[in-house]
Image (tube, coloured by chain):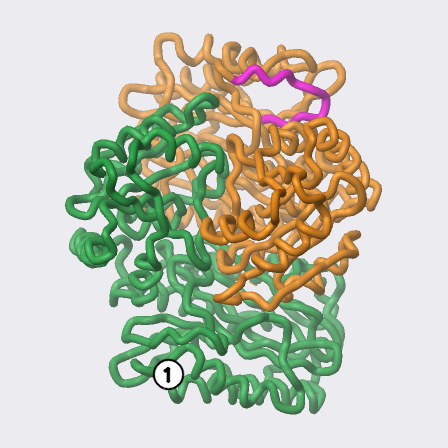
Chain colours: A orange, B green
């Protein structure tokens, strides 16, 4: 038996006022009109939730497709399996069309096509997110059936409209991300309770997730990390049973969810005293995040944050295989933009980013990650910024 | 501080011997040859893992696409972001081609197209899963670019080959599912420790996930449920803060993961003494699962299991909006087949199914779920079968 201490410390209200969804719709509809789109057809969890508030872990089941149509004017229309009708009925959406799914012969295809024919004039264009970090969550064969059943209406790309919109978070969204970060920060602070020399890594993973829940996470959507001598081999592996040993560097990288919004940051510990190379690498990683933080403000680009960190971590020790040094964060563990040389996204107030530099130490790596939000005058840490000195277990 | 008691009780070995992957490849390659496919192109987590053993929670990040090509002869070829190279290098796959992702201009598209041109003769066919319960996990625009960059090779549906293969589990897969079920069963047995009159439902959810972890789950991929007077409104909602009250029926439905395999079953409790209608409904649900279990054996169809349960639950009290009365289970929370009237899948030894009848009680519902495996002579419960009497909290 143990006590759950976190529930009383949650900082923000659940859900959003209806005005939040009305504002999101108004913004996307302005952009749709400019792009010549009569409707958006959405199918993935964050896309549907962004315009409705429809929050459920049921998306874990890959069985049923779910659709939301956002017309160029008016409220969104849900075309969903009947199992979701009750929950969708609690959102601000009032046009909810259901079918009994799964239906092996017609799993929402004809209902979706009929709704598109109702909402979109023949010959008009329907946008679907088709760019980087998107996919269409429905069977490919069914997409072709819808296409052949909507007359001269054309399904085309959304020109990045949704990306542009979702990258900039509202104050209410930022508060939820900050709550998630606060919860994860409290769990990280308690890692010395569960991790010490001799503890099997898989038990550390399990008990760390328990700490996240105890501190108030709704669920722990992501945990990865590593623990090896003087660094780790990669940052995405599941836990082994190997016990922590003196000289290991333990890293835990978690994405906890609070009211549908994510944290995403990590922490490193040295098991026993840290070697000079581990101490130096950790200080270098913190310096890199500080360098990016210093220049983060509206007008700076994603690429400039990358260069600020890369100048520090790609010196004598070199980089890693991660492919980027940070990314957007919000309704998903990772979102646009990417902190890479080729991403010239201009930062705006309300963007939430992770700063995630990595260094190589011989054949091992170390990675550090913090979460920040862009403000009118600069940036603010949402995660409790780590010290330069690597903590010792 | 609390103790983790589950780690010592895990029943099966992690991972699979290489022969398991060789056998999966041999089976799929026989079917591919029959279907005239020179390669399969796979992009989703279970598809890639099925042929490689590549297990990571990193799929939670929607940013990067991942590809596996299974040629009609020879070993699979991984075309993946460089961040996954180290972990994929620990599998039996030895042809691992990487790019530095994310790449805004070419996120694996040309590497994938080049690999397909290497592996598949011009004019030949490449299969992708495109039927029920599938989706292609890559940007739609990139699929079109791949199509236009592979000459006369055609990307077509896989004719359900992967569905047929994955529905029948090996003994090693069944052991992992049974371990997950055992862990969830131990957590369910401890619910009286955390749930009683006055406990807020969101705290029950949080603490139940902690119990699952404490009992040995790698992670808790799914938890939903409900708690209302005399039943609940639906089975997919997130938790409210409402305290449990006498007369509530609490239901928790969880999918815990052990070594990449899922459990998926639920339990109901009455807060205080159960009303007659709740008692009757619970007994009816157990009787329905028993009726399906009795006839479950090789040669029975999915539809026959549906009818066996539906005859009991669709009597005077009627059904629910769930759309089916059970489904396959394995690498995902839900898999083919569906226990519905129109699914005539013939059961085979090694299929793992959930039996999930539901009943309406006035404007509320109750749902019960168990997990079974089809054996040569009948079926066996993987979840610890619940009693007819609804337990009281």
Q: Residue at x 69, y 15 (%)?
A: A298
By secondary structure, the bulk of the magenta-drawn segment is best described as loop
Horizontal relation, residue B287 to residue A258: left or right: left
For the residue pair B3 and B148, the one nearer the viewer reads as B148
Does residue A300 sit above or below B263 in this rendering? above
Residue A381, magenta (yes or no): no
Residue B17 seen in this snapshot: no
Q: Position of residue A98 (x, y in %)?
A: 66, 63
The residue beneath circle 1 is B296
Q: Position of residue A211 (x, y in %)?
A: 55, 48
Which quadrant of the figure has residue B393? bottom right
Residue B48 seen in this snapshot: yes
Which quadrant of the figure has residue B5? bottom left
Q: Classify the position of the C terminus of chain A by image quarter.
A: top left
Q: Residue at x 69, y 41 (%)?
A: A39
Q: Position of residue B334 (x, y in %)?
A: 46, 62
Q: Residue at x 62, y 51 (%)?
A: A67
Q: Secondary structure at mark 1?
A: loop
Of all chains, the one bearing label 1 is B
Marks counted in the figure total 1
Horizontal relation, residue A203 to residue A256: left or right: left
**Which residues fall within the magenta stretch?**
A343-353
Q: Position of residue A339 (x, y in %)?
A: 52, 20
Residue A347, magenta (yes or no): yes
Q: Residue at x 30, y 67 (%)?
A: B168
For the residue pair B344 and B13, the one nearer the viewer reads as B344
Does residue B249 sit above or below A125 in this rendering? below
């Amino acid at each position: 038996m143990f006590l759950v201490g976190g529930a009383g410390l949650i900082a923000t209200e659940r859900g959003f006022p209806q005005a939040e969804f009305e504002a999101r719709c108004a913004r996307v509809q302005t952009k749709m009109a400019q792009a010549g789109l009569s409707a958006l057809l959405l199918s993935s969890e964050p896309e549907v939730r962004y315009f409705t508030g429809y929050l459920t872990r049921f998306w874990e089941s890959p069985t049923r497709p779910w659709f939301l149509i956002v017309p160029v004017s008016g409220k969104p229309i849900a075309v969903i399996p009947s199992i979701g009708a009750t929950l969708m009925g609690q959102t601000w959406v009032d046009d909810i069309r259901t079918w009994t799914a799964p239906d092996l012969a017609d799993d929402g295809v004809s209902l979706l096509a009929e709704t598109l024919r109702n909402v979109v004039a023949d010959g008009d264009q329907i946008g679907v997110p088709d760019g980087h970090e998107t996919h269409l969550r429905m069977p490919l064969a069914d997409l072709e059936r819808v296409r052949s059943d909507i007359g001269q209406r054309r399904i085309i790309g959304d020109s990045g409209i949704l990306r542009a919109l979702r990258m900039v978070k509202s104050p209410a969204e930022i508060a939820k991300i900050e709550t998630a970060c606060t919860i994860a920060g409290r769990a990280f602070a308690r890692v010395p309770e569960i991790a010490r020399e001799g503890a099997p890594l898989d038990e550390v993973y399990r008990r760390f997730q328990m700490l996240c829940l105890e501190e108030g996470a709704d669920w722990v959507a992501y945990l990865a990390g590593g623990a090896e001598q003087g660094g780790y081999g990669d940052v995405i592996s599941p836990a082994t049973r190997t016990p922590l040993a003196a000289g290991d560097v333990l890293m835990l990288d978690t994405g906890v969810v609070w009211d549908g919004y994510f944290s995403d940051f990590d922490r490193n510990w040295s098991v026993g005293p840290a070697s000079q190379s581990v101490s130096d690498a950790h200080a270098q990683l913190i310096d890199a995040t500080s360098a990016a933080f210093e220049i983060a403000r509206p007008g700076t680009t994603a690429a400039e944050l990358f260069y600020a960190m890369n100048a520090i971590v790609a010196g004598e020790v070199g980089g890693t295989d991660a492919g980027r040094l940070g990314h957007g964060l919000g309704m998903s563990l990772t979102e646009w933009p990417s902190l890479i040389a080729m991403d010239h996204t201009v930062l705006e107030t309300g963007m939430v980013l992770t700063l995630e530099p990595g260094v190589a130490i011989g054949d091992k790596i170390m990675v550090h990650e913090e979460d920040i939000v862009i403000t009118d005058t600069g940036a603010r840490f949402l995660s409790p910024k780590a010290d330069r000195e690597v903590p010792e277990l």
